[in-house]
Every structure is written in C-alpha cells, then in structure tokens.
Image: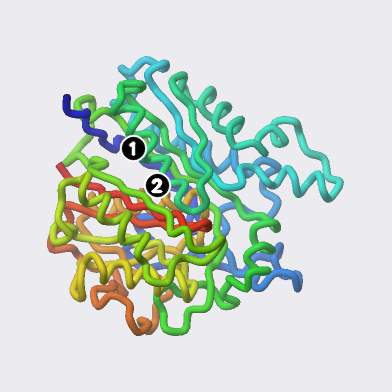
C-alpha cells in the first residue's frame, strides 16, 4: 500500500532578522543580514561578538521555550483551518535541538536564580513534552538531537509518524539559543569568523553563531485541501555519515553526495529535475569546499541554482534545518531564488550556479535542502509543489 503524502500546512519563525515569516520573506527578497555585535560576547575568550541574535540580552531565563513557543504560535495559526478538525490525540510533536535550554545551566553556574521550569527544559525531551502539552499535541512526542542535521531529521521523523498512521498532523519545531557555552566552544575550535560569516566567499574563515525558533506543521496531504494555493509536500529525504572525524567533514564530499542521491531516489527524481538547492553553507573553509564538491559529484559542473542563508541568520544549530526549510517554502510559494547574504567574491570551486542576489525563478517545483553536522552526519530533504 502506498504511504500517504505529507504536506506543509503552516510555518513560523523568529530569527535574527525579526519575528514572523513575513519579516523573513522581506529579508530574503533584499538579501539582508541580521548579524550584529552583541555585548554579551565581547570577552577575550570569544573569537567575535558578531552573532545572529533573535532575543535581546538576558531577555528570558528560558529562551529555548520562548523561541519555540513563538514559532509554534505562528505555525499553528496559519495551519488552524487544517488542524481544527483533527483530534488532539492525532497531533504529534517533534522537537529539534542540540542544547535545549542551556541558559539554565549557565545561570546556575553563575549563582543566579533559575526557576524549576527553566531547569526542567535543560532536557530536550522534557522541553518537547511541555511544548506538546501547551500546544494541543497529545499524540506521539519525540526529541531529535543530531548536531546540525537535527532539523531535517525531525522533519523526516514527523513525516514518518504520519506515513505509518501514528498521527494525522505533526508540529515540528526547531530551537537553539545563543549561549556562552556554544560561542566559547566554537571559539576554542577557531571556527568563528571575526567579521561575520561569509558562506562560499573566497575570504571566508568561519561561521557566526545564531539563534532561532522555527516551526512547520505537517499534515496528511489528503487533509490539506484547505491550504491555499499549490501544496508543498515533503517528497523525499536521505541521510548518511562520513565516519571521518569528530568535527571535520569528509574532504571529498562523498557522504553528502550519498545523502543527496538517497533523497533523489526516494523522491523518484533525477538531478536535472531539482530547481533550487539551499545549502548548509556555514562559511567555514572545509564545510563549504566539501559541500561544493558533493554538488559537483551529483549535479556536474552546471547544476541548479544554489544559495545559503547563514550570512543572514547565523548558524542556528538544531533550528537550522527547520528555519532554512521554512525559507525554502517561502521561496517556493513566491517563486524566487534567495541570494547568499554577505557573499562578495565566490571562492574557487564553488558551484557556477551560486546565487549572489535574490532573483525571480524560471520555475521552482522541486527544492533540495542540505545540512551537515559534527560527527560526519549529512541530511538532504526534497520539497515539491503539487
């Protein structure tokens, strides 16, 4: 029996560029960047104070919960006509995060007060459980923490819950907040660009940490008749592991190429049918070079248009796969190709089809979203108009 299709019924976002998908769409149309210097990260132990902050300094004792809640509020509001008839026990939730509410641990280490609810959300599974209870999802609840591929895996897990009949709708939410722990960790690896990240640029030298809350409501495609316009479905996905290094990707891009080919196979598409690729594009020398090699391996020298958005949002870790998929949805709905913010001069070896500035798309029926992460994990997700 053929598995049911899975459609996107609603999206939500709070990022360094602002709150709401309309704000994100406007920034994508103008290639804006939300990277700014933050006073919190001016100490010598941090490589740079430039970050993608969605919240103000010390805005909350539970920033992970706050970011996730706002994103879910937006996504549920957009999807409400579809969600209304679905019993709450048939609605699931999958959370994607790498550090959950690590702010609580930092507050405790500094001797500051920290409410029990914030301490509870140090554990991703408990944060997922509380979000599910607060947002009317009494079905299956999961938490995915798989480095920077977490968001794509969470979307895949949500789709599988629907396909195997465990739920009729799933709220997928990705969240990570800026913390001294994360910024200091990347600083220790010498992985941060002091001037702000420049994905695929010839002078790139690192990433910029960011924070975000992003949410996508997935529903059975046969329940999505109330979604206005053409539906966007999760068409296929793939994953792999380089087995190369704790933090460094395989230099030849073979692992990511394997994940892309797996996604194309499950989507029953050829490389030539992909109209746009949203790259992981961290701005680190090794990641961008590896990703470029993987794309050449699969698509050849003249592949589909490629761009990356971390020069706008920063690297949002567990939220990256979800927020960047939201960006793909916005681009597909509005038929344009996002640019690559902060790119000045493309590095040698980057795809010839790299998109610098946003422009209208000749067609945008199939989009490929890529993420890679520590431990050599690779993820690929294909979205399609139907």
Q: Position of residue 109 (x, y in %)?
A: 82, 48
Secondary structure under the numbered disc 1 in the rendered image: strand
The structure residue drawn at horizontal position 22% and vertical position 28%, both measured from the top left corner, is 4
The structure residue drawn at horizontal position 28% and vertical position 75%, both measured from the top left corner, is 351
Q: Is residue 14 above or below residue 124?
A: below
Q: Residue furthest front?
A: 243
Q: Position of residue 207 (x, y in %)?
A: 53, 69
Q: Position of residue 172 (x, y in %)?
A: 42, 37
Q: Is residue 156 left or right of residue 50?
A: left
Q: Which mark is residue 10?
A: 1
C-alpha span from label 1 to label 2: 16 Å
The structure residue drawn at horizontal position 56% and vertical position 78%, both measured from the top left corner, is 195
Which comes sooner in the sequence, label 1 or label 2?
A: 1
- The residue wearing badge 2 is 152
Quadrant of the image for the C terminus?
A: top left
| Mark 2 burial class by Cα count in 10 Å: few <14, some 14-19, many 20+ | many
Q: Is residue 274 left or right of residue 197?
A: left
Q: Is residue 32 left or right of residue 39?
A: left
Q: Nearer the viewer, residue 123 or 266?
A: 266
Residue depth check, mark 1 versus mark 2: number of the one nearer the observer: 2
């Amino acid at each position: 029996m053929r598995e049911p299709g899975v459609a996107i019924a609603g999206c939500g976002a709070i990022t360094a560029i602002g709150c709401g998908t309309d704000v994100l769409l406007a920034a994508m149309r103008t290639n804006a960047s939300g990277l700014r210097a933050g006073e919190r990260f001016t100490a010598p132990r941090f490589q740079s104070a430039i970050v993608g902050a969605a919240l103000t300094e010390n805005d909350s004792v539970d920033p992970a919960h706050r970011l996730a809640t706002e994103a879910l509020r937006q996504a549920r509001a957009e999807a409400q006509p579809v969600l209304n008839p679905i019993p709450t026990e048939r609605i699931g939730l999958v959370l994607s995060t790498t550090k959950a509410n690590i702010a609580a641990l930092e507050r405790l280490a500094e001797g500051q007060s920290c409410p029990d609810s914030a301490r509870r959300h140090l554990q991703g599974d408990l944060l997922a459980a509380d979000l599910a209870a607060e947002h009317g999802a009494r079905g299956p609840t999961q938490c995915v923490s798989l480095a920077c591929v977490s968001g794509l895996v969470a979307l895949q897990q949500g789709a599988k819950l629907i396909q195997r009949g465990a739920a009729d709708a799933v709220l997928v939410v990705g969240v990570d907040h800026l913390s001294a722990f994360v910024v200091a960790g990347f600083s220790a690896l010498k992985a941060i660009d002091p001037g702000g990240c420049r994905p695929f640029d010839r002078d790139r030298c690192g990433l910029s940490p960011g924070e975000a809350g992003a949410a996508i409501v997935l529903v059975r495609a046969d329940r999505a008749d109330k979604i206005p316009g053409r539906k966007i479905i999760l068409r296929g996905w793939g994953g792999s592991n380089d087995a190369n290094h704790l933090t460094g990707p395989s230099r030849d891009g073979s692992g990511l190429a394997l994940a892309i080919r797996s996604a194309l196979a499950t989507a029953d598409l050829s490389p030539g049918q992909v109209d746009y690729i949203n790259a992981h594009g961290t701005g680190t020398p090794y990641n961008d070079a590896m990703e470029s090699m993987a794309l050449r391996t699969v698509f050849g020298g003249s592949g589909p248009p490629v761009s990356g958005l971390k020069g706008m949002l920063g690297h949002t870790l567990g939220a990256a796969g979800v927020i960047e998929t939201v960006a793909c949805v916005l681009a597909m709905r509005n038929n344009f190709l996002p640019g690559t913010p902060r790119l000045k001069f493309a590095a040698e070896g980057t795809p010839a089809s790299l998109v610098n500035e946003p422009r209208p798309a000749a067609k945008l029926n199939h989009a490929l979203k890529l993420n890679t992460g520590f431990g050599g994990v690779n993820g690929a997700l294909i979205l399609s108009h139907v």
